[in-house]
Amino acid sequence: MTAATAVTRGGTPWTPIYVEAIDSKVCIGCGRCFKVCPRDVLTLQDRGDDEVDDDWDDEDAKAMMVVHNAMDCIGCGACGRTCPKGCFKFVEA
Ligand code: SF4
Ligand code: SF4
C-alpha cells in the first residue's frame, strides 16, 4: 500500500504516522501523551494485578495508557515525541 501523504501549510509533503500500539510493559502512566493528543485517541486504564509482572519495579505505575479511539488518529506523532519511555509503535496508512 502507498503511504498517505499530506502537506504542510507551506506545501511541504509529509507522511502521517498513525498510532498502532502502546507498550503496556514499559508505560509509566505519566499522561504526557494524553495531554498532547488533539483527537481523544488515548485513555488511561487501571492496571489489574494480572498486568503487573514480578519484576515490575515502579510502584507509582498503577495505570497505563491505551488506545481506545484509533480510527480518530490523524497521525501527527505528538504522543510518541512526548513519551519518555518510547512506548509508541506507529504505522503509515
Ligand atoms: S498520532 Fe497524534 S492524533 Fe494520533 S494518537 Fe498520537 S497525538 Fe493523538
Ligand atoms: S507518555 Fe509514554 S509513559 Fe507516559 S502515559 Fe503515555 S505511553 Fe505511558
Image (spheres, rainbow, N blue to C red):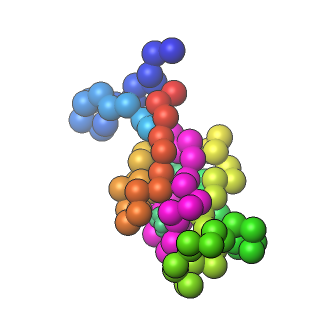
Image location (x, y in percent) of residue 72: 62, 44
Is 22 on the left-hand or right-hand side of 16?
right
Residue at the (54%, 55%) spot, across then down: 23
> Percent position (x, y) of residue 75?
47, 41
As drawn, 32 above or below 88: below
| Residue 93: percent from left, percent from top | 51, 27
Residue in the picture at 47% in, 51% down: 88
> Which residues make up the magenta segment?
18-40
The answer to whether 36 is drawn above or below residue 31 in the figure is above
Residue 35: in sight, yes or no? no
For image coordinates 43% across by 45% down, the residue present is 76
Residue at the far top in the pictured view: 1
Residue 53 included in the magenta stretch of the image = no
As drawn, which residue projects farthest toward the front? 54
Comparing 2 with 66, the one in front is: 66
| Residue drawn at the location 56% of the way across and 42% of the way down | 20
| Along the line of sight, the residue nearer the viewer: 50 or 82 | 50
Residue 87 point in image, percent of width and height:
47, 56
Above or below, comparing residue 30 to residue 86 in the picture: below
Left or right: 48 in relation to 42 = right
Q: Is residue 42 visible?
A: yes
Q: Is residue 19 left or right of residue 80?
A: right
